[in-house]
Image (tube, grey):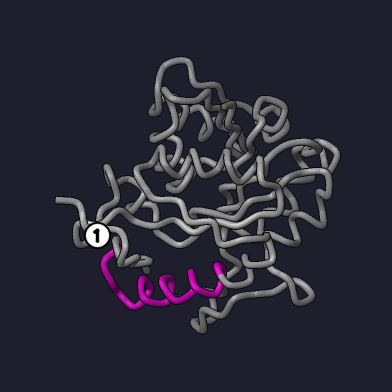
Amino acid sequence: MKIGFIGYGNMAEALASKWVGKHAVFIGGRNLEKAQALANRLAAGVGFGSEAQAVAFGDTIVLATTHEAIPAVMEAAGGAGAFAGKIILDINNPVDVMHGDYLTRTYDGISLAEAIAVYAPQAKVVKAFNMCQAKVWQMTPPLFDGRRLVTLYCGDDGGAKKQISALIEDVGSEPEDLGELKYARLLEPAAAIVIKLLFSGRDPHTVLNLIKPETKAIG
């Protein structure tokens, strides 16, 4: 898989570090120095460049910016047409942390992931990796009470979801398909619960994990 990141923050680094070596990775963003610094930390030969270069490189594009920046970075990457045929992996949460209420923003009644799909209708949008802080994705593997972390994901394209499911496995987590992209309307508010707890001082490894009785704990 060829994975282009737009963004070079903690989430981008945590996920890219699990995928580099298994997949071709490119780090893109407005600040080329920051993109280069992350590429250098990941591995020799990891590419870096602009948003447009990241989209041109990848068959899967990870939007790893703040949610407020998504419209601008997608425009900078070339607009909706640049994403045609690509898998867009949305890992973001439109949660208001500035005013302290941690409520999830909606876009005319739909989720951020659905709004991205409306903007880029020829892309295949999948929502995943939004439920945990970056430190969780740094764990090898992410285990809680002896159980693998379950990563919920959703999307409308079966082939795209299969690709993202493989990436979830690559980080050591267990994929769980929630269904169509409309169920991002559940994932984004669920993540807001974790975000509220984190901002109240909880350990950054705090998660909401799906416990499946049929799956035994490891060990």
Along the line of sight, which residue is nearer the eye, 36 or 145? Answer: 145
Task: Judge whether residue 198 is colored magenta.
Answer: yes
The residue located at (78%, 36%) in the rendering is: 85
The residue located at (46%, 62%) in the rendering is: 131
**Relative to 140, is 10 on the left or the right?**
right
| Residue 108 drawn at (x, y percent) | 79, 75
Q: Quadrant of residue 3?
A: top right
Q: Can you say whether 117 is above or below 93 in the image?
A: above
Along the line of sight, which residue is nearer the eye, 12 or 165? Answer: 165
Q: Quadrant of residue 132?
A: bottom left
Region in magenta:
187-204
The residue located at (60%, 55%) in the rendering is: 127
| Residue 164 drawn at (x, y percent) | 55, 43
**Relative to 61, is 85 on the left or the right?**
right
| Residue 136 drawn at (x, y percent) | 33, 53
**Relative to 75, is 32 on the left or the right?**
left
Q: Main secondary structure of the magenta part?
A: helix
Work out which residue is located at the far left of the displayed protein and give it. Answer: 219
Element on which disc 1 rests:
strand
Q: Quadrant of residue 78?
A: top right
Task: Judge whether residue 22 is colored magenta.
Answer: no
Q: Amino acid at mark 1?
A: Phe
Which residue position is annotated with label 1? 144
**Relative to 76, is 177 on the left or the right?**
left
Mark 1 closeness class: few <14, some 14–19, many ≥20 residues within 10 Å: some
Q: Can you say whether 115 is above or below 125 in the image?
A: below
Quarter holding the N terminus?
top right
Q: Can you say whether 152 is above or below 86 in the image?
A: below
| Residue 215 drawn at (x, y percent) | 30, 58
Work out which residue is located at the far bottom of the displayed protein and give it. Answer: 101
